[in-house]
Amino acid sequence: MLKIIIPTIMLLPMTLLSPPKFLWTNTTMYSLLIASLSLQWLTPTYHPYKNLTQWTGIDQISSPLLTLSCWLLPLMIMASQNHLQHEPIVRKRTFIMTLITIQPFIILAFSTTELMLFYISFEATLIPTLILITRWGNQPERLSAGIYLLFYTLISSLPLLVAILHLHTQTGTLHLMILKLTHPTLTISWTGLLSSLALLTAFMVKAPLYGLHLWLPKAHVEAPIAGSMLLAALLLKLGGYGIMRLTMLMAPISDDLHYPFLTLALWGALMTSSICLRQTDLKSLIAYSSVSHMGLVIAASMIQTHWSFSGAMILMISHGLTSSMLFCLANTNYERTHSRILLLTRGLQPLLPLMATWWLLANLTNMALPPTTNLMAELTIMIALFNWSTFTIILTGIATLLTASYTLFMLLMTQRGVLPSHITSIQNSNTREHLLMALHIIPLLLLILKPELISGVPS
């Protein structure tokens, strides 16, 4: 555990002390080294916890998410090079340090075995994200986006703190392994119901559940590219991971709780997919598609079967890579045309033919085409939900149809059609961007060969 966390923290002095010429090279190189080291967490084992220290341990649910979070740091640094190139060196250092600071907190949040430490690291990831959005965002609206993000997260996570403290007074411990051995404290009483609600609400806002999702499109649209990748690929997964962790503890979760969440999640998947069909803003469209995919994850982790948990796990990983890649592609368009409006960036395929290939691949992955893990995850979740209640097939079916249609709409709008008259010259796509896209899509296509690495099933 420490052999990843300590090098990650040591990236900070390296960012400060690197000569300006080698700043990007050093940080990218060393974070890639850390990412390749973190692949060892995926090794299958019969033990419930690997790499166990006193406060951290890695099991089948957290190891894929941990590897994903280490994998995305070099990609975020690579994606941010272009839009920081005219800034003074001090600001570049500050930006990279903000990205690196959030990393140990995310690693801690995913690997901790103690609920209080989990809460602290869960909240601590908010501060660097806020700095990223409110300092390096593109429009002046970034301040209101930051305020939305801050208050949504804070208002929802204070009840979580109270519920964790209540749990501690009930059981005398917050260690996950001991909590599994104690009797379920959250019984079917008003106290139990409200504390379960408080435990879940924070993660529902983070995940985001439809209805509590209003901060997400704002934050995504205003964030710089690294902030968008961080939000889509990692911070949304914190919500899903928290739900999966804590629903295991609330042994028989009462019907009054999970019916509203399930209906909201499935209905939200349908609603946000149809919102996507009417979007004019490219980043906003990708943000709303994140909401609909995470709705499936919430619905799956609410019914608590083995199938649904493994489906939710696979969907979280594949959605992390896919939406991160889509944001990178949207950013390459934005850096060339300085506009996110779909009408103003049409017909780019003849100009950037290789980028059009990446667009096609990313969009096919997003609409869950075989042979991608997205398809495997969505099928697993739909089968689990259908087994739980046959009626859900209507909602999930329509949501899948709408997902396919808005993805194709996005592809056709950006790549096909008449080139707008104001685009006269456009800079070529460069090797860095192609490497960035390749590092997103190659793991995604390789994972279908051995999906049990990310399925959260003890192998």
Image: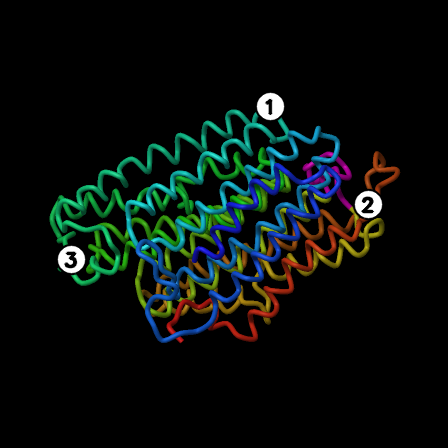
| For marks 1 and 3 on the same chain, the one whose residue lies earlier in the sequence | 1
Query: Can residue 47 be found in the magenta stretch?
Result: no
Q: Are marks 2 and 1 in contact (CB under 8 Å)?
A: no
- Say which element carries label 2: loop
Q: Which residue is mark 2?
A: 418
Residue 184 badge? 3
- Say which element carries label 3: loop
Q: Residue 34: where, in percent of width, then height?
A: 56, 56
Q: CA distance from mark 2 to mark 1?
A: 31 Å
Q: Quadrant of residue 48?
A: bottom left
Query: Can residue 343 be found in the magenta stretch?
Result: yes
Query: Residue 149 vs residue 362: left or right?
Result: left
Tell me if mark 3 has few (under 14), some (14-19) or many (20+) residues whose alpha carbon lies within 10 angstroms of its own. Answer: some
Q: Residue 279: where, in percent of width, then height?
A: 60, 41
Q: CA distance from mark 3 to mark 2?
A: 62 Å
Depth order, front residue of 14/280: 14
- Say which element carries label 1: loop
| For marks 3 and 2 on the same chain, the one whose residue lies earlier in the sequence | 3
Depth order, front residue of 372/392: 372
Tell me if mark 2 has few (under 14), some (14-19) or many (20+) residues whose alpha carbon lies within 10 angstroms of its own. Answer: few
Residue 381 badge? none
- Its colouring scheme is rainbow
Judge whether residue 406 can be spotted in this image.
no
Q: Of the residues shown, which amino acid type is indicated by label 2?
A: Val
Query: Residue 69 vs residue 139: left or right?
Result: left
For image coordinates 58% across by 56% down, the residue present is 322
Give the residues in magenta.
Answer: 333-346
Q: Of the residues shown, which amino acid type is indicated by label 3?
A: Pro
Residue 140 badge? 1
Total labels: the figure holds 3
Judge whether residue 310 can be spotted in this image.
yes
